[in-house]
């Protein structure tokens, strides 16, 4: 569940919830938690989120307990941010200071989630551009990708890599094929850990995997594939402290993508719907 809460936070921060053509870069505002309504289709059914985001009921339960003690004071966005941080810590990773006081979005947008969230098929140039659009640096991008040291991915997201790509350890690819058949539609939802070395620990093993061409997703291995990010991957693979420092800085940077404050948005009483 820790990996799910961290991914849920990431998927929230990367999506502009604006329903207009104006890109307000709304960032971490709990828009991903909103259910569909008569006036908008939310982000949960967007293609990058289908079968990927979990933990919504965990956030709902936390919110209910917080509301019982302190009514309409702590936003769902803040709870999601803190839950992601605490999940990393619980799995052995670093801690960081979460800036509180942010407020919640009053809308969500499926098409924006489809557009904004980087898919596992992206190459390095597309990944760099996607993160730059959120004012995140290349170092932020490589560090945040290290969140893949925990969690799992579905076969349909890495099938092409293990059968058709050449920059992959052959033994690693073969070991995955038994659980992920070549034929599309067969075993699509079968899961494999993003980090086969230590799948339930938050550490820097993900980067060592990339050095051995054992990145599960195409987008993972792109970070170490003869490009400009190779040296950063090597640094994080050799130094857990360097990774931890960069990851915490990147999480703070991502959490500061145009937060709603003051009179913007609202503090929802329930994370799955706007206040009536």
Image (spheres, grey):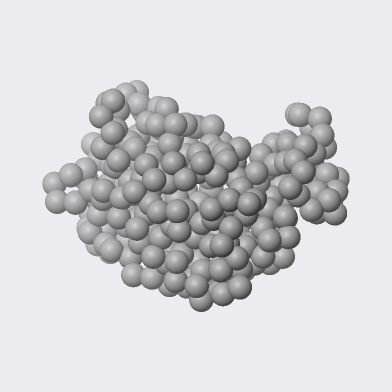
Marks counted in the figure total: 0
- Residue at x-position 23% and y-position 48%: 260
Q: Which residue lies furthest to the left in this view?
A: 263
Residue 175: percent from left, percent from top = 84, 52
Q: Indicate the quadrant where residue 75 lies.
A: bottom left
Judged left or right of residue 62, residue 146 is right
Q: Is residue 274 visible?
A: no
Residue 214: percent from left, percent from top = 72, 55
Residue 82: percent from left, percent from top = 38, 63
Q: Can residue 261 be seen in this view?
A: yes
**Rendered position, 157 above or below 201:** above
Q: Quadrant of the C terminus?
A: top left
Q: Which residue lies furthest to the top in this view?
A: 38
- Residue at x-position 27% and y-position 58%: 74
Judged left or right of residue 63, residue 73 is left
**Rendered position, 189 above or below 267:** above
In terms of depth relative to the viewer, which is nearer, 122 or 44? 122
Judged left or right of residue 226, residue 173 is right
- Residue at x-position 77% and y-position 43%: 166
Q: Quadrant of the N terminus?
A: bottom right
In terms of depth relative to the viewer, which is nearer, 135 or 270? 135
- Residue at x-position 31% and y-position 50%: 257
Residue 56: percent from left, percent from top = 47, 48
């Amino acid at each position: 569940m820790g990996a799910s809460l961290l991914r849920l936070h990431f998927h929230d921060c990367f999506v502009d919830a604006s329903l207009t053509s104006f890109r307000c870069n709304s960032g971490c505002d709990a828009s991903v938690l909103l259910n569909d309504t008569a006036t908008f289709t939310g982000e949960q059914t967007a293609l990058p989120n289908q079968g990927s985001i979990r933990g919504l009921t965990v956030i709902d339960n936390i919110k209910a307990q917080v509301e019982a003690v302190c009514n309409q004071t702590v936003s769902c966005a803040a709870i999601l941010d803190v839950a992601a941080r605490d999940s990393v810590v619980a799995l052995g990773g670093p801690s960081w200071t979460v800036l509180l006081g942010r407020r919640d979005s009053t809308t969500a947008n499926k098409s924006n989630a489809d557009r904004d969230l980087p898919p596992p098929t992206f190459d390095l140039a597309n990944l760099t551009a996607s993160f730059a659009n959120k004012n995140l640096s290349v170092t932020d991008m490589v560090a945040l990708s290290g969140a893949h040291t925990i969690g799992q991915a579905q076969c349909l997201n890495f099938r092409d890599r293990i059968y058709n790509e050449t920059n992959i350890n052959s033994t690693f690819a073969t070991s995955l094929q038994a659980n992920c058949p070549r034929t599309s539609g067969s075993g699509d939802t079968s899961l494999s850990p993003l980090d086969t070395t230590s799948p339930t620990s938050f550490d820097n093993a993900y980067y060592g995997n990339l050095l051995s061409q054992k990145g599960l997703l195409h987008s993972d291995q792109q970070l170490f594939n003869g490009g400009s990010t190779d040296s950063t991957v090597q640094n994080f693979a050799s130094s857990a402290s360097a990774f931890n420092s960069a990851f915490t800085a990147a999480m703070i940077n991502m959490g500061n993508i145009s937060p709603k404050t003051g009179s913007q948005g609202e503090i929802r009483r329930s994370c799955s719907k706007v206040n009536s």
